[in-house]
Every structure is written in structure tokens, then in C-alpha cells.
Amino acid sequence: MSVRNEKCANCDAAIGKLEQAYVWQDRVVCEACHRNLQDHPTPTIEVPPPLRGPPPLRGPPPPRTPGVPVCLACGGPMDKSKVHEGSSLLAGCALLVIGLAVCAVGAIIWPLLLVGVPCIIVSLFMGGHRRPVWKCRACGAIINRA
Ligand SMILES: [Zn+2]
Ligand SMILES: [Zn+2]
């Protein structure tokens, strides 16, 4: 005759022969524990929230074209660009108007053409003066290109 000598897996209390053993999740437990366990089911193992990894990378950096600088502000590629020198553009326009006016008068008083034509030529150079720069595609930062 086998003596049942089971212990409660939960509270370690011996379960007597006459006591009813219960099985809770493949473990033998006493009646009291079984009741408690049913009232308060073992909480499911808390899965820790996924660890916040480092912020996703913005993908591999674009292949660098030799000779093309990278934006100091955002690291983006830069395109060849040109910017107008605003003040000289205005001055060039003014000079162009003056030159045309002088030439118009020069049609009558021809020596004025000697003044008017150079004015127009100079104004075209001034008006067309553009500064070569590298311009960032992403943030628009500009660095000198010479
Ligand atoms: Zn128990
Ligand atoms: Zn940038």
C-alpha cells in the first residue's frame, strides 16, 4: 500500500491522506492553495516592454561623390549651385538702364556711345555675377565653392 506523501507545491504543506490533492498547472497543491490560485490566478509572466533600441538610423548615408562636400549642418549631400550677389545685381540693373539711356542720347551725340556701351557691358557683368556655392539639398545650407 503506497502511502501518499505529497506536499503542496505552493505552500509546502503536507497533503494528508484524507485531504484532497489538487493539481494546478501540473503541480500538486493543497485545497486552500488551489482555491487561492483559482481566485488569484498566477499572473502571466510579465513580458518586459521591448527595450527602446537606438533611434532608427536614417539608412546608410548616400554614397559620397568624390569632390562633393557634405553639409556641415545635416550631413546631407550638396549640389553645385550659384547665388546671385543681390547688391551687384541691383547695381548692374541700374547701370544697364543708365547705359541704355546714355546710348539713346549717343544716337544723337555719338561720343556718348563711348560711355554708354561700356556701361552696358559692365552692367551685364555685374548683373550676371553669381557666386558659385555648394547648396545642401536637405537644409539649404550654403558654403562657398571656388
Ligand atoms: Zn498549499
Ligand atoms: Zn544640410
Image (cartoon, grey):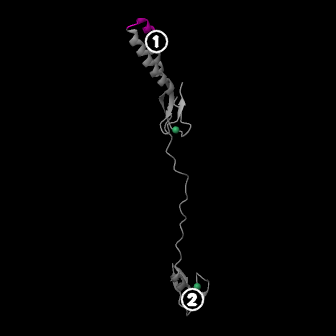
Measure the C-alpha gap from mark 1 to mark 2. Answer: 119 Å
Task: Please tell me which residue is depicted at 46% across the width and 21% down the height of the picture.
Answer: 94
Residue 9 found in image quarter: bottom right
Q: Do the residues under discs 1 and 2 have CB atoms within 8 angstroms?
A: no
Question: From the viewer's perspective, is residue 101 above or below residue 84?
Answer: above
Residue 12 vs residue 46, the one in the foreground: 46
Residue 96 vs residue 58, the one in the foreground: 96
Across and down, in percent, residue 65 comes to 49, 32
Q: Is residue 7 visible?
A: no
Across and down, in percent, residue 115 comes to 46, 10
Residue type at the position of mark 1: Pro
User: Which residue is disc 1 drawn over?
Assistant: 118
Across and down, in percent, residue 76 comes to 51, 38
Residue type at the position of mark 2: Arg
Q: Can residue 28 be seen in this view?
A: yes
Residue 144 is one of the magenta-drawn residues: no
Q: How crowded is mark 2: few (under 14 residues within 10 Å), some or many (20 or more)?
A: few
Region of the chain picked out in magenta, as a range = 108-114
User: Which residue is disc 2 drawn over?
Assistant: 4
Mark 2 residue element: loop
**Could you tell me which quadrant the N terminus lies in?**
bottom right
